[in-house]
Image: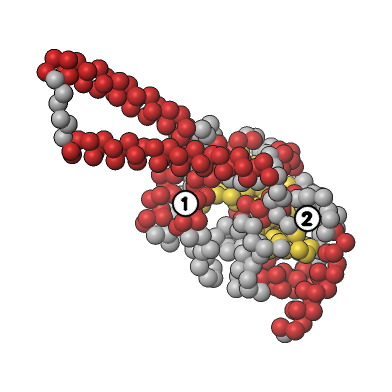
Amino acid sequence: MKTVDLVVPCYNEEDVLTLFVSETTKVTDTIPNYNFRFILVDDGSRDKTFIIMRRLAQEYPNVKYISFSRNFGKEAAMYAGLKNSTADYTVVMDADLQHPPKMLIDMVKAMEDGYDCCAARRTTRKGESPVRSFFSRNFYKFSNKVTDITMPYGAVDYRMMSRQMVDAVLALAEVQRFSKGIFSWVGFDTKWLPYENVERAVGTTKWSFWGLFKYAIDGIASFTVAPLRILSGIGFFISAVAFIYIIITLIKTLVSGIDVPGYATNLCATLFLGGIIELSIGILGEYISRIYMESKKRPIYLTKSTNIDNHADDFDDIFTDSYSSLDDTSEAKENNEE
């Protein structure tokens, strides 16, 4: 009997979480010879997501949960789930039902065919704004050109991975994570399953445009130094042009005397070079800040409460003894809210 862990990052999903577990269970019950376990990761939700997780754990014996001490982000939630997965195969999927549970059937078949990974790829972006769709489409094109990894257009986090691939992903314990890139970087044979975008069953997306923009910057900065090389090229070009201009100016000065330059020319040149300098400082700062954050070696997440035996945290288990007391506190809070 094979085992599968379903890692599900959750942030303010009180309206859909129960429906998600119910609908997914209907699918997993149709797959013979596989035992499925949910690992629900509460990423510091501000609603009743964690309370619902506890209730689901009482109703479904195969539901496990991890609750963070605060909001660490979806990447941290995925990492925590993967780190606590002990199954033969591990699935990463969202709780909003935009990742169709029925695709698990095809993913299992792909793994039985010998693939190390079976991942989903959106073929349409129905339900998204034109602006978001435009930037998403061009992000994949730009990323594939400037990085040393290839991500198919429409690739999402929804995928099933072998134990070997999960271990490889966990070996890359960088703090600022970009999982789509990490999944591509580690390699392994991957089968892609196309699907049409599904709108959220309940509620609205938790991703803002600015959040997606920062996520894209993380993705590019994590897997390429191309921006730094582009800056080097621009610097070399400007230096060459400046050197030629200096030679021309010296020759004109020797031949016809000092020529008073125009105000507009000086202003445009100053603004242009100033903009290049500011851009260069910004890009350098982005890479330096990543070095700074990684050098701190802070844990990727901190666990407040969990019902997983032998829980694996992202640091020495200094809080292990306190999990039980925190669970008691959460249960008391749940009873009070009822």
Q: Residue at x 42, y 47 (%)?
A: 137
Residue 83: x and y in percent read 75, 49
Label 2 packing within 10 angstroms: few (<14), some (14-19), many (20+): some
Give the image quarter of residue 48: bottom right
Q: Residue at x 82, y 50 (%)?
A: 316
Give the image quarter of residue 138: top left
Label 1 packing within 10 angstroms: few (<14), some (14-19), many (20+): some
In-front residue for pair 105/189: 189
Q: Amino acid at mark 2?
A: Asn
Q: Amino acid at mark 1?
A: Phe
Label 1 sits on residue: 213
Give the structural element (helix, strand or loop) at label 2: strand
Residue 87 visible in the picture: yes
Number of numbered discs: 2
Q: Left or right of 318: which side holds 199?
A: left
Q: Residue at x 38, y 50 (%)?
A: 134
Q: Determine the CA span between mark 1 and mark 2.
A: 38 Å
Residue 274: x and y in percent read 34, 39
- Name the quadrant of the C terminus: bottom right
Label 2 sits on residue: 35
Residue 214 lies, with reference to residue 270, above or below; the image says: below
Which is nearer the N-term, disc 1 or disc 2?
2
Residue 40: x and y in percent read 70, 61
Residue 134 lies, with reference to residue 18, above or below; the image says: above
Q: Left or right of 274: which side holds 213?
A: right
Residue 330: x and y in percent read 77, 74
Give the structural element (helix, strand or loop) at label 1: helix
